[in-house]
């Protein structure tokens, strides 16, 4: 899921035209050594914190259906994670860095969710919205100062980008639908003189019942497979 969020952000920033003027877009940590090796204007989108949103955790299971409305699989509910990125711009002049950060803000601040066309893999299969929060005021994880200290660099202008992404639950295939009717073999009662393999049987009481014959008590009728039903939300 994390790499799919990375790809969505990469496509989003690329569509905005940020890379058209020779600006590199990377997901590397902006350490002191990395900054010394940089030789072109660069935007770094560094993932530095991953935290589960416990309030969104659910139990139970969800049902998957085919085009005919039949249950084909069960899946545990997705779990949601906050992915927090540190977005920085790197050039030879602070003015150019601020211009690049302004372009990033203009690209992302107009969006509340990652556009559907940019969701790939499991994010696309789940079909759930992936919220974005740019430069939010609430700081839930590590502070920017702690991040810069861990990177060994000096504090500089940066944008905190928070993505709330679902991690798909475990998928379990459903058993194939029942297509045959109930079959019961009937033998003689205790004390009867009839031989055990006489094949004596009884006729079903609903339409379509046939003579059980040697195989015993059988009915040829179609039994519908499990289909979609109305349910409340998973808790």
Image (cartoon, rainbow, N blue to C red):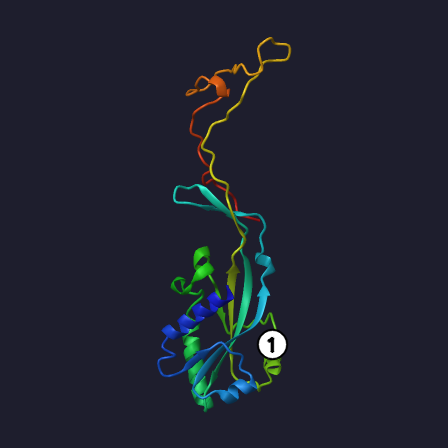
Q: Is residue 204 visible?
A: no
Q: Quadrant of residue 7?
A: bottom left
Can you say whether 217 is above or below 38 in the image? above
Residue in the foreground of this view, choosing between 158 and 124: 124
Q: Is residue 39 visible?
A: yes
Locate residue 63, reporting x and y percent: 49, 46
Secondary structure of the residue carrying tag 1 is: loop
Q: Is residue 66 above or below residue 217?
A: below
How many dots with numbers? 1
The residue positioned 58% from the left and 52% from the top of the image is 58
Residue denoted by label 1 = 143
* Residue at the extreme top of the image, as rendered: 193
Q: Determine whether 130 is above or below 144 in the image.
A: above
Of 99 and 179, nearer the camera is 179
What residue appears at the point 42 percent right and 63 percent down from the top-left corner?
A: 119
Instruction: Work out whether residue 130 or residue 112 is closer to the camera in this orientation and state it.
Output: 130
Q: Would you call the spot at circle 1 few (<14 residues within 10 Å), some (14-19), or many (20 or more)?
A: few
The residue at 43%/25% (across/down) is 220
* Residue at (45% x, 17% y) in the render: 211
Residue 164 at x, y percent in the picture: 52, 64
User: Where in the figure is residue 171, as x and y percent of width and height?
Assistant: 52, 51
- Residue 29, x across and y down, in percent: 54, 79
Q: Residue furthest bottom?
A: 92
């Amino acid at each position: 899921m994390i790499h799919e969020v990375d790809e969505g952000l990469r496509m989003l920033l690329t569509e905005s035209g940020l890379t058209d003027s020779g600006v590199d877009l990377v997901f590397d940590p902006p350490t002191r050594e990395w900054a010394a090796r940089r030789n072109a204007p660069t935007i770094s989108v560094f993932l530095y914190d991953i935290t589960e949103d416990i309030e969104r955790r659910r139990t139970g299971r969800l049902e998957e259906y085919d085009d005919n409305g039949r249950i084909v699989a069960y899946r545990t509910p997705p779990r949601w994670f906050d992915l927090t990125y540190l977005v920085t711009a790197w050039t030879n002049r602070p003015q150019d860095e601020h211009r690049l950060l302004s372009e990033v803000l203009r690209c992302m601040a107009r969006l509340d969710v990652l556009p559907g066309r940019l969701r790939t893999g499991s994010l696309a299969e789940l079909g759930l919205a992936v919220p974005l929060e740019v430069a939010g005021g609430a700081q839930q994880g590590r502070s920017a100062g702690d991040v810069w200290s861990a990177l060994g660099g000096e504090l500089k202008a940066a944008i905190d980008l928070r993505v709330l992404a679902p991690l798909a639950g475990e998928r379990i295939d459903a058993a194939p639908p029942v297509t045959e009717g109930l079959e019961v073999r009937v033998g003689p009662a205790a004390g009867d003189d009839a031989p055990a393999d006489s094949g004596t049987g009884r006729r079903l009481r609903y339409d379509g019942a046939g003579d059980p014959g040697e195989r015993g008590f059988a009915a040829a009728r179609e039994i519908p497979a499990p289909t979609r039903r109305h349910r409340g939300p998973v808790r």
